[in-house]
Amino acid sequence: MRQITLNPIVHRDEHSKGVEEGLMCYLRDVLFDPLREIVSSENLRLNAQTGKDHSVLWDALMVGTLWYADGVFSGTFNAAISRELRAIGAVRSGLGFKLDPSDIPLGLRAAIHESARRSHDLHALLLVTLGAMAAHVMEAPTGVVHTKTVDTILANLQEQFDKTVSAAGLPEPAQLPPGDRTEFVKTLVTQTDLAIKIFIVEAISNLRAKISENSAGRLDRLSKLIEAAFGVARRKAHTIAEAETALLVSRYGQLRFESIGSKAYIWVTSHDERVRPTHGESNNHRVLDGRTFAWNNPPIVDTATGRRRHPGEDFGPCRCGARPIIVII
């Protein structure tokens, strides 16, 4: 009887790219593009009304790059706008220009009133739209199908599996049964759908709060708020894609190695600075490195909660791997 250790099947960056792209398409279609369209349409309408014998100060108020509240003009100033403000008696104060409401020319008062009305209406429309999104997002299907992506991932994993088995001098393994492939697709779709929907509910709540906070502010901030949220969404889609594909790789490895007789494996970390530290913390990945565990009894990866996981299954995503052990009689 002898024991051999095989190379692990590893998760690669390209495994998560297709999943991430699908999630980003969903986020654009369901949340960000509708909001961008609302703001863009209003900006086009406002811009179309500027430059028609109006002053640059009037134009800036109309498009929302300038705002008047509590006796102060604030926003984006250039030389022409600053000259006009000084010409009507405004005085530089901090980052804005101070002018008593009673000193504002009548025509400019109308522009300030109209700017405030348009800002209120646009903020209200965005909040109503976000409310409608929040009411339906959990029930509506995402429409994201990962079939082709999973097929590409599984083809790569099968190639890795064949190579590690061949390098160990073991018989050529069988291909993955169609039923298992179907289950991998179903699991990935279910898990990513749930994760992205939970995130989008949170993103909608955060956007509603930020838009409400800005409701007495400038129109030009709305696009910045939406794009900042989009940046957060992009990072979240990347994290979800990495975590769920790492989980797929881990489960594939366990399934395939058990199919050729493996009962246990050696936990291996990536041996770099990104491995989770254990200095007084509950995560134990560095402690687990090099130790042997049974496939049917995953180790505790978090002593605080007692959570048990195989390599690649823990939150993060986990970048650890499993070197399967085969006992040959």
Image: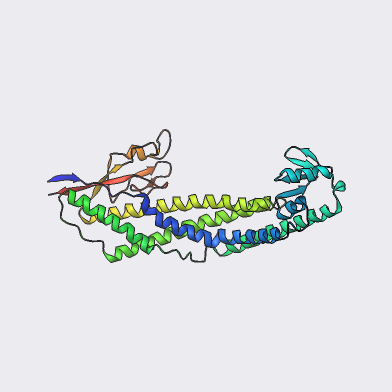
Q: Nearest the camera: 158 or 105?
A: 105
Q: Residue at x 39, y 53 (%)?
A: 16
Q: Nearest the camera: 109 or 134?
A: 109
Q: In this image, 222 relative to 146: left or right?
A: right
In percent of width and height, residue 19 lies at 41, 57
Q: Residue at x 17, y 57 (%)?
A: 172
Furthest residue toward top? 279
Furthest residue toward front? 53
Compared with residue 208, is residue 271 higher up or lower down, i.e. above or below? above
Type of colouring: rainbow
Q: In this image, 173 relative to 139: left or right?
A: left
Q: How many marks?
A: 0
In percent of width and height, residue 158 lies at 26, 56
Q: Nearest the camera: 321 or 3?
A: 321
In percent of width and height, residue 165 lies at 20, 51
Compared with residue 284, is residue 156 higher up or lower down, i.e. above or below? below
Q: Residue at x 30, y 66 (%)?
A: 179
Q: In which image quadrant can residue 119 be found?
A: bottom right
Residue 318: tell me if it is visible. yes
Q: In this image, 133 relative to 213: left or right?
A: left
Q: In which image quadrant can residue 41 be found?
A: bottom right
Residue 257: tell me if it is visible. no
In percent of width and height, residue 136 lies at 56, 65
